[in-house]
Amino acid sequence: MMPENENPSPSTMTYLPAPQTKRTSPWLFVAIAALALAAWQWFETRHRLLDVQQEVAGQLAAFDTGNKEDRGAQKQSREQIEALQARLGAVDGKIAEFQAQSANLQALYQDIARSREEVTLLEVEQAIVLAGQQLQLAGNVPVAVLALQTADAQLARLDRPPYLPLRKALAKDLTRLNALPFVDMPGISLRLEQVLIAIDKLPLVSAGRPEKAAEDDKAAPPQSWWQRSGGAIWQEMKGLVRIQRFDRDDAVLLAPGQGYFLRENLKLRLLNARLALFSRDQSTFRNEVKVAQDLLTRHFEANDKSVQAALATLRQMTATEINVELPTLSDSQAALRSLRQGKEKR
């Protein structure tokens, strides 16, 4: 530039181009807008970051609080779990104790059951032995049947398969015994005993009827002293000579002391018949009863009712059949032995 007070010459004057009017570039606005947009985005991003930080801080605080609560809940849960484990341990101990007691009770029950079973089996064995003794020694069929029925009832109460063979054998033996003809051994024995008791009171043929005279004296009305004296003298005179009539020609006259031995002999015959009855000796029983019947017929008063009753009883016994072949209890005894052997092997 040149000073203003100097006028340049035309030769020295340099012609500069005329100054042009300045125009605002559109890129400036774009830059300013971009800058403003960047500033706004920076401010918005910062604002958002602050919000996010606050939100994250709140979430962290909430998480911390929740974590604390979770730790408290976990601690409480652990305490509850520990308490439950302690309770479970106590329950397990009680269960173990209960199982031990249950095992002991089961063992005790089995011991009691075995003891009861053994006692029942012994009772069954005794019943079978009793039945065999009654059959072989006394021939008492009803008692033997009752003993076998009792043994079968005891086995039925046990209700176990191993005892079925023994029950089958008992049923077979009971069927055999029930099929036997009935012989009333106790009844026959009692009737013999009644005849034995009545022997001392039976009147003898040779003894006359002094009881009849005594009864007539008792039935006579009261007499004076001279009538009684005369009657006594008359009885003494009649006693010097006695006339007696016998309906049989073969009547045996016995001395006064022989009547006792006759009665005792008759009792012995009846006792022998009773022993033969219990031993089921048919021949001896009938022979002794016939001998006793013959003694009653020959030496005792036939018109007396007690003598007639004794004779009727002896005649019935003569026709009685006592010799019944009794079966053995071999099936029941064999089944019992097999059962015992099986238990011993166990």
Image (cartoon, rainbow, N blue to C red):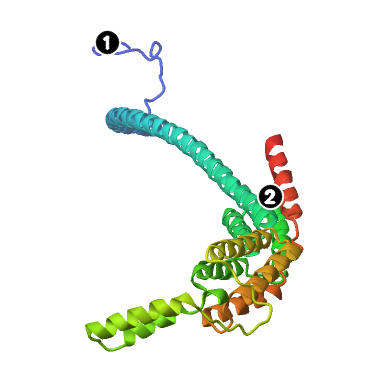
Which residue is the site of mark 1? 3
Q: Position of residue 223 (x, y in %)?
A: 25, 86
Quarter of the view holding residue 206: bottom right
Residue at the location (73% across, 70% down)? 179
Q: Which residue is mark 2?
A: 162
Task: Answer whether residue 319 is visible to the viewer in this image.
Answer: yes
Q: Is residue 346 visible?
A: no
Q: Quadrant of the N terminus?
A: top left
Residue 243 spot, x, y in % from top left? 53, 82
Identify the residue at horizontal 53%, vertical 38% (top origin). Answer: 111
User: Residue at 74% of width from left, 45% of height from top?
Assistant: 338
Mark 1 lies on a secondary structure that is loop
Earlier sequence position, callout 1 versus callout 2: 1
Q: How many marks?
A: 2
Marks 1, 2: nearer the viewer: 2
SS assignment at label 2: helix
At label 1, counting other C-alpha atoms closer than 10 Å, the crowd grade (few under 14, some 14-19, many 20 or more) is: few
User: In which quarter of the view is residue 62 placed?
Assistant: top left
- Residue 202 placement (x, y as % from top left): 52, 73
266, 228: nearer the viewer = 228
Label 2 Cα neighbours within 10 Å, binned few <14 / some 14-19 / many ≥20: few
Question: Could you tell me the amino acid type at mark 2?
Answer: Pro
